[in-house]
Amino acid sequence: MRIFRFPVTLVIALGWLPGTAGAAMYYLPPAEFSLVGMEMSVTALQQDTLIDIARRNDVGQEAIVLANPEVDRWLPGAGTRVVLPSRHILPDAPREGLVLNLPEMRVYYYPKPARGEEPVVYSFPVGIGRMDWETPLGETRVISKQKDPSWTPPESIRREHAEQGDPLPRVVPPGPDNPLGRYALRLGIPGYLMHGTNKEFGVGMQVSHGCVRLLPENIETLYETVPVGTPVRIINQPVKVGWYGDELYIQVYPPLEGASPEHSDLYTLAENAVDAALFQRPTSINVAAIERELARPSGLPVKISGSRIPVY
């Protein structure tokens, strides 16, 4: 895993190779700035799907589809340029512990730096709970960690599988058929885990029974680096706004399926976030750029400063 430093000129100097776009560790920018990563793209091969490209680059499935609206998910075509969602505005939350932003389907980990070390942030794509098995919002902690966990499916999940003709045993032992994968972090919310998966395509989608799925190599990193007791914040921020030097950016995701009006009114969320950023530092705003992104979210940071058009 490569470490990327703010600003971008230093990132380029350190180098960013394909295959490190989604799962990365960045030096944390100063508190007044929020962008990490850099713009990246790759060229599709003849046999590629967008899902293949996402997996090779540790990017979530829905994220790569959002970033490439004109590219066919299943047949992008040889030579097609595919944008990687590899630049992120950090969520509006304390920069400590684990921060899971559900609409983004991405988790950020801010380890506590040792004396003399520069603070860093890890970033990983995740799969989350579908509408009828929502991943809950709120604050909790990692209360335990387990390698090669067994899985005891709740009766509700066993009934669902039985109705689909796929009955589950009362206990699924460790191994390739275990949906928890090799590693699990148990949260203080009863019944909820952050864990690996034996169905990698579900990472970056709203498909789980409420738990948080990570790619095998990414959950292994968290298992090895996240101490028991680490705080966890689960948030719902489909709109993020942040500064990069003198430039202001917005990053928008579609609201979660079944989200409340509080978390689905993108225009109000954007207005509030932009107002908060302008309270820190006034600048001119390109309203047209904001409206385009709200109308069709790309999940990519979009520059919204630098115009003489007044804000809203």
Image (tube, rainbow, N blue to C red):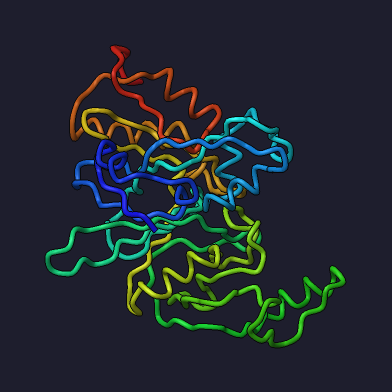
State the residue lying farthest toward the left: 116
Q: Position of residue 291 (x, y in %)?
A: 46, 23
Quarter residue 129 falls in: bottom right
Tell whether 31 sits left or right of 70.
left
Where 280 falls versus 117 (above or below)? above
Where 292 falls versus 169 (above or below)? above
Quarter residue 198 falls in: bottom right
Tell whether 226 sits left or right of 236.
left
Q: Nearer the viewer, residue 262 or 257?
A: 257
Q: Residue at x 76, y 85 (%)?
A: 169
Q: Nearer the viewer, residue 133 or 36?
A: 36
Where 36 falls versus 202 (above or below)? above
Quarter residue 226 falls in: bottom left
Q: Residue at x 42, y 69 (%)?
A: 222
Task: Count how many numbered circles sit on residues in the image.
Answer: 0
Q: Residue at x 42, y 39 (%)?
A: 239
Q: Position of residue 298 (x, y in %)?
A: 52, 34
- Rendered-image quadrant of the C terminus: top left
State the residue lying farthest toward the right: 165
Where 81 falls versus 230 (above or below)? above
Q: Residue at x 47, y 78 (%)?
A: 186
Q: Position of residue 72 (x, y in %)?
A: 70, 34
Q: Nearer the viewer, residue 208 or 63?
A: 63
Q: Nearer the viewer, residue 220 or 250?
A: 220
Q: Position of residue 29 (x, y in %)?
A: 23, 47
- Rendered-image quadrant of the N terminus: bottom left
